[in-house]
Amino acid sequence: TKALSISQLHKTYGNGFKALKGIDLSVNEGDFFALLGPNGAGKSTTIGVISSLVSKTEGEVSIFGLSLDTDRVAAKKQLGVVPQEFNFNQFEKVFDIVVNQAGYFGIERSVAMKSAEKYLRQLGLWEKRDNPARMLSGGMKRRLMIARALVHEPKLLILDEPTAGVDIELRRSMWQFLQEINAEGTTIILTTHYLEEAESLCRNVAIIDHGTIVENTSIKALLKTL
Ligand code: ADP
Ligand code: ADP
């Protein structure tokens, strides 16, 4: 099965701007996949549509064979998304932010609490669990976003520019964490405009430019063409 399948996806924003002009993309289960492209290419728009935060104009998106149109709730259970902007409540406690997210997926509270503990520990945030999110450093907030996206144990994790503005030490530890969960079976897609990040982490890559996929290949093959 495909973890993600997108066909002929178009997005025209309200002002008439065509951000996506017929995207076709499929990502295999277990892959570590990079969506690479310059600023303004359409990466965030694509992720926005997949995570139902942006409405599509036309096209089909399915997650593990579940259509976002006809099986939206089941599809979203398979998906964890880490958007670029911190969109949690800054006044809420770290632990509550993660546990409450699991509630959206109908996960029982005792199970959610165990899962939240697991990911907060793995991401080095357990000591901060009773702090309001606004007390965290930028790097910690980024890791909190990842813990929240994983709490319902999604099979597909999508991260939008996960290491933008993150220092090199934290970037390395985030890379290592993502490699571990990928090795345990989670399919990962990340967007980046750093080729180096894609090269270090990913097996396959698609390049998006001006709302169109211009290349879709293995990272090894891509590096040979440069
Ligand atoms: P990327 O993530 O690759 O930097 P985006 O998906 O954020 O690209 O943006 C793609 C294009 O769509 C850009 O030209 C951006 O200015 C435009 N865009 C993004 N959001 C909106 C919006 N709400 N209304 C109009 N244009 C938008
Ligand atoms: P609704 O299903 O009510 O439309 P939204 O899509 O607006 O919910 O999402 C509510 C919040 O949950 C947002 O802050 C969004 O970033 C986050 N979110 C949405 N989908 C996911 C997901 N699959 N994984 C993690 N967070 C998500």
Image (spheres, rainbow, N blue to C red):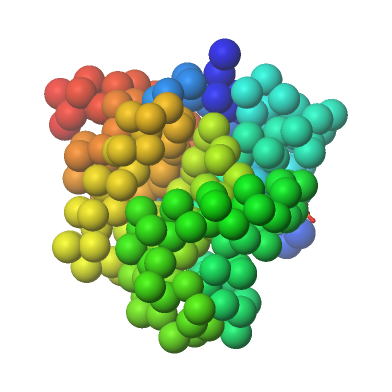
Can I make out residue 33 in this image?
A: no
Q: Residue furthest front?
A: 110
Question: Ligand 2 quadrant?
Answer: bottom right
Establish if 140 lies above or below 41.
Answer: below
Q: Is residue 146 left or right of residue 173?
A: right
Q: Which image quadrant: the N terminus?
A: top right
Percent across and percent down for residue 143 are 40, 62
Q: Residue at x 67, y 20 (%)?
A: 65
Between 200 and 216, the one lying in front of the other is 200
Establish if 68 lies above or below 160.
Answer: above
Can I make out residue 14 in this image?
A: yes
Q: Residue at x 20, y 39 (%)?
A: 200
Between 174 and 52, the one lying in front of the other is 174
Establish if 132 lies above or below 49.
Answer: below
Percent across and percent down for residue 219 are 26, 27
Establish if 24 lies above or below 199.
Answer: above
Q: Residue at x 67, y 62 (%)?
A: 100
Percent across and percent down for residue 55 are 75, 48
Q: Residue at x 34, y 21 (%)?
A: 217
Q: Is residue 175 left or right of residue 149?
A: left
Image quarter of residue 188: top left
Percent across and percent down for residue 42 are 52, 48
Q: Which image quadrant: the C terminus?
A: top left
